[in-house]
Image (cartoon, helix red, strand yellow):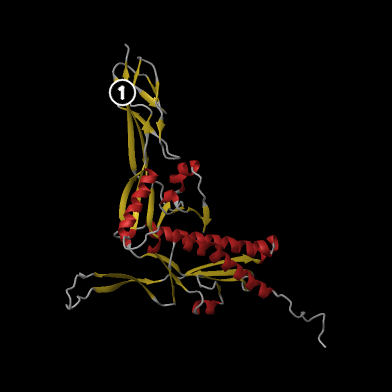
Amino acid sequence: MANVETTAETNLIKAAQMAKVREVDFVSQFTHNSLAKLIEVLGVTRKIPMMEGTTMYLYTTSGTLQSGAVDEGAIIPLSQYATTKTPVGEITLHKWRKAASAEAIKKSGYEAAVRDTDAALLRDVQKTIRSDFFTLLTGDITGATTITGNGLQGALADAWGQLQVKFEDDTAEAVYFLNPIDVADYLGTAQVTVQTVFGMNYIENFLGLGTVILTSGITRGTFVATAKQNIILYYLTMNGDIADAFQLTADELGYIGIKSGYQNEERAQIESLVMDGIQFFVEYAAGVVKGFISPSVSLNKSTASVAAGSTVSLTATTIPAGETVTWSTSNSSKATVSNGTVTGVAAGSATITASITVGGKTVTDKCVVTVTGS
């Protein structure tokens, strides 16, 4: 008869099983609550799993449609199409590791030292994937279209028009990537629903033009737009040899793998290992629109008549949120200006200029101040 004092009970939940639960919870949070939703918002319809050692290719199909006006009994001409493929290399395997020492566990407890730091690792992995994605969008995409639009709505409308032309054979669902500050004024006055995905905010059907994703990964005063169906996700499956070799737990699609809470007895520490091979591409470079949002500034008056030695106040309006107006005068001996108040106006006139620069674009407005007395 077994010694009941030294033998574990039947169905006892053991530490090894709980480690597995933590790993499953980790990948579930990563994919279902975050990455999967981002892919849905981006409209990625092609998610292509790759096995280890497989080379990635971008495929382009082109051809010429022959005339369909064929005489009775005549041979119908062939329309020829060809697919070309361009190798883009193998997917990079990303690896992350963290460790909690025995001393850290003694001081803070296992929960804080291991599980809480696993959650922090998850957030940083997400941040890295976001960063890589925006590096792709903002990098040098040969053949991308560049435009400058008048203000936020004008810029996005111009981009929408470009996408309708670029994807005229398809129903282009536009997605725009903007800096949050560029839409701050609009968000302050409009009733819109801002949702969160993968550490970013997004707005569906913004201005009736498509989905807008707000992120600091885009430089203020600029934006990137493309059709949702133009984004492809390649990923090295974490359900293959690598996962087997390192005993990784992966989600059902194999986006990410983790081994959490394993012991490194030589160093007396508990470690976690995370791997992924996620890579985004745009298939059609000309279908990427990179734009500048032309800023605007206007003075409340274009001319002003004042008595000698008096002051006149000028107000700059329609300034993008968070921007600062620069004031100058054509002749500092006749007038000086500070924050819109013109002082020291002498005989003659001075042209006061208000200017603003956003995203490398500078716009100005002017007011001519004329003295009416001696």
Give the camera-side residue of 252 and 355: 252
Place residue 298 in its image quadrant: top left
Residue 342 seen anywhere in this rendered image of the structure: yes
Between 225 and 113, the one lying in front of the other is 225
Q: Residue at x 55, y 67 (%)?
A: 97
Please report the residue visible at 37 percent of the width from the left and 19 percent of the height from the top.
Answer: 344
Q: Position of residue 180 (x, y in %)?
A: 46, 48
Q: Position of residue 291 (x, y in %)?
A: 34, 50
Q: Secondary structure at mark 1?
A: strand
Q: Quadrant of residue 172?
A: bottom left
- Quarter of the image where the C terminus is located: top left
The spot of residue 371 in percent (x, y) is 32, 17
Q: Which residue ends up furthest to the front in the rendered image?
A: 72
Locate the N terminus and report the quarter of the image it occupies: bottom right
Q: Which residue is mark 1?
A: 350
- Residue 80 left/right relative to 337: left
Residue in the foreground of this view, choosing between 75 and 160:
75
Q: Is residue 281 above or below residue 341?
A: below
Q: Residue furthest top?
A: 374
